[in-house]
Image: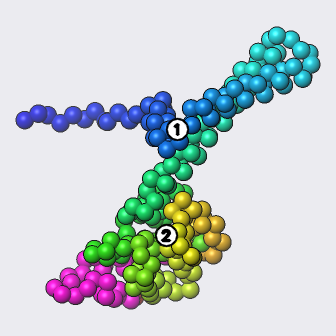
């Protein structure tokens, strides 16, 4: 039997990640190479132009400003590719099951806590409900057909209101219809919610909701009973 190795797995380096990011983005935007080259050339031209405008005009000054322009162009190109890659990612996952969970768990930052796992799901139709807790209160996100999400959303809202009375609850539906939020704008909409609770209250709400969710998951459910109809015990 082969011995287990204790050597930690080597993570890809910066340039390897950059190469992967470029390949992913260029699949969605074939014009990306020309845009990046244009940004670099514009940066160099800007630097050289400044070198000619600022006295004393000398070769060494123009070269230094040209190099500075190149560095600025590299930074601008990297920022452009990063933004385009994010847009490409949203386009790729739009409409896929679990897309909302991915956005909630990776794009909200430290001021919000969320998981990529749904808190409610219809196994037959794949409709799912996700939850995030932050300074803006509790956010419930429905993914799937809005008509079939009504019961799942209402059940989750009722559970939150039982354990966190007075905390604002906001509901978003992911989609492209009326009163729905495209997956690419979901994180922005959540982070733009006004602050309603402080950090202490936020931590208490997270603890209460997690304890109730764990107690429901550990409860034995008799055969033939819909888990979504099992009510959470009231906190003591």
Q: Nearer the viewer, mark 1 or mark 2?
A: 1
- Whole-Å distance between the Cαs marked 1 and 2? 28 Å
Q: Which residue is mark 2?
A: 174
Q: Residue 223 lies in what quarter of the image?
A: bottom left
Read off the magenta span: 205-234
Q: Residue at x 45, y 74 (%)?
A: 142
Q: Residue at x 59, y 72 (%)?
A: 136
Task: Measuring from the top left, give residue 128's x and y in whole percent.
Answer: 38, 72
Q: Say which label, 1 or 2, has the lower sequence index.
A: 1
* Image disc number at residue 120: none
Give the class, few, some or many, for how many residues have Cα within 10 Å of label 2's Cα (few <14, many ≥20): many
Q: Is residue 69 above or below residue 100?
A: above
Q: Are marks 1 and 2 in contact (CB under 8 Å)?
A: no
Task: Measuring from the top left, give residue 33's x and y in whole percent.
Answer: 56, 32
Q: Residue 98 lies in what quarter of the image?
A: bottom left
Q: Residue 64 lies in what quarter of the image?
A: top right
Q: Quadrant of the N terminus?
A: top left
Q: Is residue 8 above or below residue 111?
A: above
Q: Which residue is mark 1?
A: 30
């Amino acid at each position: 039997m082969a011995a287990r190795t204790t050597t930690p797995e080597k993570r890809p380096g910066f340039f390897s990640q950059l190469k992967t990011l470029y390949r992913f983005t260029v699949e969605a935007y074939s014009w990306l190479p020309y845009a990046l080259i244009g940004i670099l050339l514009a940066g160099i031209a800007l630097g050289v132009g400044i070198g000619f405008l600022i006295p004393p005009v000398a070769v060494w000054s123009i070269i230094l400003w040209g190099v500075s322009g190149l560095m600025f162009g590299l930074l601008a190109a990297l920022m452009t590719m990063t933004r385009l890659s994010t847009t490409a990612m949203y386009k790729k996952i739009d409409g896929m099951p679990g897309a909302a969970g991915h956005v909630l768990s990776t794009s909200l930052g430290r001021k919000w806590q969320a998981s990529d796992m749904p808190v409610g799901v219809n196994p037959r139709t794949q409709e799912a409900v996700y939850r995030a807790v932050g300074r803006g209160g509790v956010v419930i996100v429905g993914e799937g057909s809005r008509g079939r999400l009504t019961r799942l959303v209402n059940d989750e809202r009722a559970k939150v209101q039982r354990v966190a009375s007075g905390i604002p609850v906001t509901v978003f539906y992911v989609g492209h219809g009326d009163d729905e939020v495209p997956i690419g704008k979901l994180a922005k909409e959540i982070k733009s919610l006004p602050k309603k609770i402080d950090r202490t209250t936020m931590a208490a709400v997270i603890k209460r909701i997690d304890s109730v969710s764990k107690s429901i998951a550990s409860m034995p459910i008799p055969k033939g009973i819909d888990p979504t109809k099992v009510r959470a015990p009231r906190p003591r």
